[in-house]
Image (cartoon, rainbow, N blue to C red):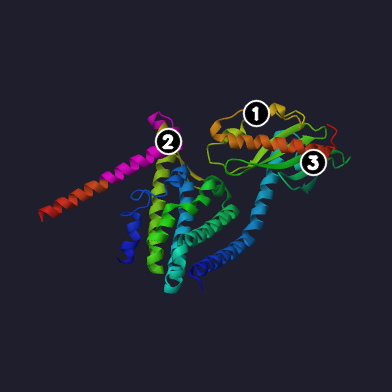
């Protein structure tokens, strides 16, 4: 057999063996990772509602609707008695410098942004702390009114992370007409 | 070389960080906290020992060695990348805060010169047991080196010492006694370079002095 072909086959075999090993490890770590992410999301949801004085998760009937794309989850919070829609919480992600930045954004039934929080990021420690404290000028505004967010500026070293947060708001603004009927 | 010498050469004589000056980038980036250094050290230990073992095992058969030789670098990369991915997935699932702290530097272990260097320079031409001992020594040397850097940086930069999770020593009383505040610069990249530079200079000064003393004793004899 051609020597180069034989070497290639060795490499291919090794790749397949390693692929199987990784599939095996993934099979038992993936459910734990998913459970961890869901727990984090739920905790963030609860603390965000409390932070913006919108109640707690126990005060509402919560329906979760997994979505595809950057806005990957939608929680509908309704009044348990009247069943009226109170808030919609979007779980949205955007690519930062080296990780996905995951946010929760609360929009009320009038499409007004009532609160937001950064759930997770794995950017270089210490370089992006400020993205948690920047005022994104979105609270109390119409969710589709993302023009004001252009006024937010940040340090150039962390601009990718900052831009990711801004993109999260933009993704939600794009999603709003689908959920609220497009009459904006 | 016996196994003891084989092990200890990685810690002192051929320390990958302070003597060979390899794997600098992640070493300086993650040493903001002692916990990060310990976590990175454990990850590198796992990858280095296993990659040395697997490369050595693969190369121990003459027939396979001939076939692997032309594609040996991709072969090493496939082995190392698989091990690193295992570490990353396990860390993501069970050590989430450490996973977040180390960030991009976990996948970057794949291209860490120490691991690739030991696979090529040692494991490919030695027996599996020797390669495992070499990997353990080199990983221990690397871990001790980054722990030393993190120890200095965290105390001077933050006035704390985070050993693991919530186990943290608050050393602010030392700064209060000296009537100064922690020097934030040591938590930043410039502090990493300065700490590394001072430690490297101190280690070289001690080594040179020792060598000069040994040479002097040799001359007298």
Badge 2 crowding class, 10 Å Cα cut-off, few under 14, some 14 to 19, many 20 or more, is few
Instruction: Report the residue marked by disc 2.
Output: B190
* Span colored in magenta: B176-205
Work out whether A6 lies above or below B199: below
Residue B86 point in image, percent of width and height = 55, 58
Proximity of marks 1 and 3: CB atoms separated by less than 8 Å: no
The answer to which of marks 1 and 3 sits earlier in the sequence is 3
Is label 2 in a helix, a strand or a loop? helix
Chain letter of the residue carrying label 1: A
Q: B121 and B39: which one is in front?
A: B121
Residue at position x 54%, y 46% in the image? B103
Q: Do we see residue B154 in this rendering? A: yes
* A17 to the left or right of B199: right
Is label 1 in a helix, a strand or a loop? loop
Residue at position x 44%, y 46% in the image? B27
Q: Is residue B30 magenta?
A: no
Q: B165 and A75: which one is in front?
A: A75
Residue B98 point in image, percent of width and height = 54, 48
Q: B201 and B38: which one is in front?
A: B201
Disc assigned to residue A135:
1
Q: Gap between marks 1 and 3, in whole Å? A: 28 Å
Q: Do we see residue B57 in this rendering? A: no
Residue at position x 50%, y 61% in the image? B79
Is label 3 in a helix, a strand or a loop? helix
């Amino acid at each position: 057999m051609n020597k180069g072909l034989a070497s290639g086959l060795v490499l291919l075999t090794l790749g397949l063996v390693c692929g199987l090993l990784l599939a095996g490890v993934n099979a038992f770590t993936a459910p734990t990772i998913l459970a961890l992410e869901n727990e984090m999301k739920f905790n963030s949801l609860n603390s965000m509602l409390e932070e913006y004085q919108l109640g707690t998760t126990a005060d509402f009937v919560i329906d979760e609707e997994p979505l595809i794309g950057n806005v990957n989850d939608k929680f509908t919070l309704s009044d348990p008695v009247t069943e009226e829609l109170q808030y919609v919480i979007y779980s949205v992600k955007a690519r930062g410098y080296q990780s996905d930045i995951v946010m929760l954004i609360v929009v009320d039934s009038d499409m007004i942004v009532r609160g937001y929080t950064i759930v997770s990021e794995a950017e270089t420690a210490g370089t992006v702390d400020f993205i948690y404290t920047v005022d994104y000028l979105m609270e109390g505004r119409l969710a589709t009114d993302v023009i004001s967010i252009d006024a937010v500026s940040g340090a150039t070293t962390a601009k990718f992370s900052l831009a990711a947060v801004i993109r999260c708001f933009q993704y939600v603004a794009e999603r709003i007409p689908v959920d609220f009927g497009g009459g904006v | 070389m016996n196994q003891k010498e084989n092990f200890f050469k990685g810690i002192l004589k051929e320390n990958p960080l302070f003597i060979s000056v390899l794997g600098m980038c992640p070493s300086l980036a993650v040493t903001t906290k002692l916990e990060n250094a310990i976590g990175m050290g454990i990850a590198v230990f796992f990858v280095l020992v296993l990659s040395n073992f697997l490369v050595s095992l693969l190369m121990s058969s003459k027939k396979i060695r001939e076939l692997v030789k032309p594609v040996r670098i991709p072969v090493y990369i496939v082995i190392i990348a698989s091990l690193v991915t295992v570490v990353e997935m396990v860390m993501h699932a069970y050590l989430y805060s450490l996973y977040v702290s180390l960030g991009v530097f976990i996948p970057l272990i794949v291209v860490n010169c120490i691991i690739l260097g030991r696979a090529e320079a040692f494991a490919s031409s030695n027996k599996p047991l020797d390669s495992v001992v070499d990997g353990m020594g080199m990983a221990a040397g690397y871990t001790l080196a980054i722990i030393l850097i993190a120890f200095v940086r965290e105390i001077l930069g933050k006035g704390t010492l985070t050993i693991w999770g919530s186990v943290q020593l608050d050393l602010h009383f030392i700064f209060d006694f000296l009537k100064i505040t922690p020097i934030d610069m040591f938590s930043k990249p410039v502090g990493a370079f300065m700490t590394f530079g001072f430690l490297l200079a101190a280690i070289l000064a001690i080594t040179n002095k020792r060598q000069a003393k040994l040479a002097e004793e040799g001359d007298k004899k």
